[in-house]
Image (tube, grey):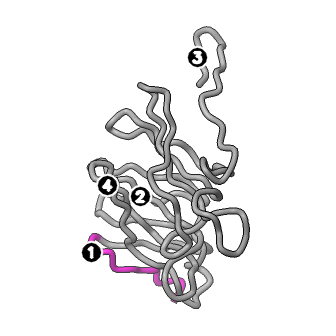
């Protein structure tokens, strides 16, 4: 936390290992409930192929100065996010993982309902098309309710979570 009026910096939390997650990429998102939400790329549940874990989706509550895990990415549907969460007008958070999913395990688009704390896989990017594999960054929800994302190319999900790629990739 940085207080700009008095030039004062205060460390609030250390992401130091598997229990807390580590290697934070992206930004914090301020939700309607006043909490901050973010993701780590590693940590959480221990990776069966090594010591790194698959990452954590976490919350920081500034009212009680507490950081806690909402969800440990498990390496099945979800693994190793490299980006930020996006908060839609209805309060739902959207995100992407660069690994996990069915088939080729090359990423998942998901949503998080903050009322229920349920994470929902919306689409598995498993395919043999490299331009839609291993997404990074932040998904964006457009006015027409398409959720856009980027990997080596641009893709979007419509309101029924059907997958589309722009015609210039066909």
Residue at 52% across, 72% down: 154
Where, by quadrant of the figure, is residue 4 drawn?
A: top right
Residue 13, above or below 163: above
Could you give the CA–CA distance between mark 2 and mark 4, rounded to whole angstroms?
A: 9 Å
Taking the image as shown, residue 138 lies to the left or right of residue 110, namely right
Contact between marks 1 and 4 (CB within 8 A): the answer is: no
Of the numbered discs 1 and 4, the one sitting upstream in the chain is 4
Q: Position of residue 152 (x, y in %)?
A: 62, 74
Contact between marks 2 and 3 (CB within 8 A): the answer is: no
Residue at 66% across, 37% down: 14
Provide the secondary structure element on which disc 4 rests.
Answer: strand
Which label was assigned to residue 94? 2
Taking the image as shown, residue 98 lies to the left or right of residue 92, namely right
Of the numbered discs 2 and 3, the one sitting upstream in the chain is 3
Q: Nearer the viewer, mark 1 or mark 4?
A: 4
Of the numbered discs 1 and 2, the one sitting upstream in the chain is 2
Q: Which residue is mark 4?
A: 113
Could you give the CA–CA distance between mark 1 and mark 4, rounded to whole angstroms?
A: 17 Å
Residue at 56% across, 81% down: 105
Of the numbered discs 2 and 4, the one sitting upstream in the chain is 2
Q: Which residue is mark 1?
A: 160
Q: Is 113 within the magenta?
A: no
Quadrant in the picture for the N terminus: top right
Of the numbered discs 1 and 3, the one sitting upstream in the chain is 3
Q: Position of residue 164 (x, y in %)?
A: 41, 80
Which label was assigned to residue 3? 3
Q: Nearer the viewer, mark 3 or mark 4?
A: 4
């Amino acid at each position: 936390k940085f207080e700009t009026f008095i030039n004062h910096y205060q460390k609030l939390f250390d992401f130091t290992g598997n229990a807390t997650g580590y290697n934070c990429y992206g930004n914090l998102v301020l939700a309607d409930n006043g909490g901050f939400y973010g993701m780590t790329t590693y940590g959480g549940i221990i990776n069966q192929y090594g010591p790194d874990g698959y990452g954590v989706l976490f919350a920081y509550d500034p009212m009680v100065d507490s950081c806690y895990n909402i969800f440990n990415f498990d390496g099945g549907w979800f693994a190793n996010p490299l980006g930020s969460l996006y908060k839609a007008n209805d309060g739902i958070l959207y995100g992407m993982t660069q690994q996990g999913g069915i088939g080729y395990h090359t990423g998942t688009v998901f949503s998080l309902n903050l009322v229920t704390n349920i994470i929902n896989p919306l689409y598995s990017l498993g395919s043999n098309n490299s331009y839609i594999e291993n997404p990074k960054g932040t998904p964006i929800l457009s006015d027409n309710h398409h959720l856009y994302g980027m990997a080596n190319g641009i893709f979007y999900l419509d309101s029924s979570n059907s997958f589309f790629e722009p015609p210039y990739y066909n």
